[in-house]
């Protein structure tokens, strides 16, 4: 099992897209943090506490890059047919899938942690430069939630890639659904949106949106984890039964 995990880490390191997505995740978080401090205006009814919390919550902007990172992790195997060699080297497919999940989860955790740290430093410096309050007591919990949420999106991407297999289709569908459709549903139809993965993840982060009633943090975390676990289970069972040639 350790050899399979090391092989997955080697694949991740040797693919240029992994480094591009990792850099993009960090840069995107930093840019959104600066934009939130100096350009964006507070929402109507937003308190000073919610404003500061929202700035640090920009650390979750890494989720889209990690979602795509996970998708490419599985669709790339099918696109280049390296999945065939992986299953030939280890005929027990469950072990290969478990090794991939471990490697991508740990890599996603590392990338999201770096993005969160960069966001925290950028937020503190930007807020201080703007002469605003720099810190709130729940900021550490917010950053932890961002790291956990983005890491889970990595696993969600793996599962989506395993189910769809066609790289362009999988990325396009995931981007359109998670970045646009669910985001709009959470804001404009929260009674439905809060039960979707994006709504659950925002609850995990402790988002307080004026006029939007999200789940409690613990419920959001449990629901989002359930979505990831369910989709991973379906993807695993499908991969075990599917002809990979």
Image (tube, rainbow, N blue to C red):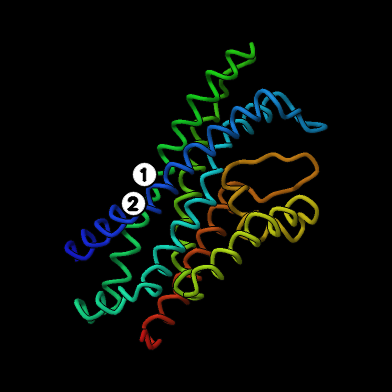
> Would you place residue 102 above or below residue 203 in this image?
below
Residue under numbered circle 2: 106
Q: Which quarter of the image is occupied by the N terminus?
A: bottom left
Q: Do the residues labelled 2 and 1 touch (CB within 8 Å)?
A: yes
From the viewer's perspective, is residue 77 above or below residue 57? below
**In this rendering, is residue 9 above or below 164?**
above
Q: What element carries label 1?
A: helix
Residue furthest toward the left? 3
Quadrant in the rendering for residue 2:
bottom left
Which residue corresponds to the image point at 69% horizontal and 39% vertical from the top-left? 208
Disc tally is 2
Q: Nearer the viewer, residue 124 or 224?
A: 124
Answer above or below: position of 17 versus 226: above
Q: Residue at x 57, y 43 (%)?
A: 205
Q: Quadrant of the C terminus?
A: bottom left
Q: Which residue is drawn at 21% across and 58% down?
A: 6
The circle on residue 110 is 1
The Cα atoms of the two marked residues, 2 and 1, are separated by: 6 Å
Q: Which residue is drawn at 51% across and 25% down?
A: 122
174 left or right, relative to 184: left
């Amino acid at each position: 099992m350790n050899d399979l995990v090391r092989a997955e880490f080697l694949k991740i390191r040797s693919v240029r897209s992994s480094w591009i997505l990792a850099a993009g995740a960090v840069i995107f978080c930093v840019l959104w943090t600066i934009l939130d401090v100096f350009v964006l205006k507070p929402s109507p009814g937003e308190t000073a506490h919610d404003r500061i919390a929202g700035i640090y919550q920009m650390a979750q902007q890494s989720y889209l890059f990690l979602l795509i990172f996970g998708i490419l992790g599985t669709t790339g195997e099918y696109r280049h047919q390296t999945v065939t060699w992986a299953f030939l080297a280890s005929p027990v497919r469950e072990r290969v899938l478990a090794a991939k999940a471990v490697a991508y989860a740990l890599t996603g955790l590392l990338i999201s942690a770096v993005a969160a740290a960069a966001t925290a430093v950028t937020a503190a410096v930007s807020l201080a430069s703007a002469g605003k309050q720099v810190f709130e007591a729940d900021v550490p919990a917010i950053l932890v939630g961002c790291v956990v949420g983005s890491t889970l999106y990595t696993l969600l991407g793996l599962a989506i890639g395993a189910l769809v297999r066609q790289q362009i289709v999988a990325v396009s569908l995931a981007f359109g659904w998670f970045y646009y459709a669910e985001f709009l549903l959470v804001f404009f139809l929260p009674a439905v949106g809060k039960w979707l993965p994006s709504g659950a993840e925002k609850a995990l982060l402790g988002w307080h949106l004026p006029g939007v009633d999200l789940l409690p943090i613990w419920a959001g975390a449990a629901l989002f984890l359930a979505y990831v676990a369910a989709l991973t289970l379906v993807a695993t069972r499908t991969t075990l039964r599917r002809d990979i040639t």
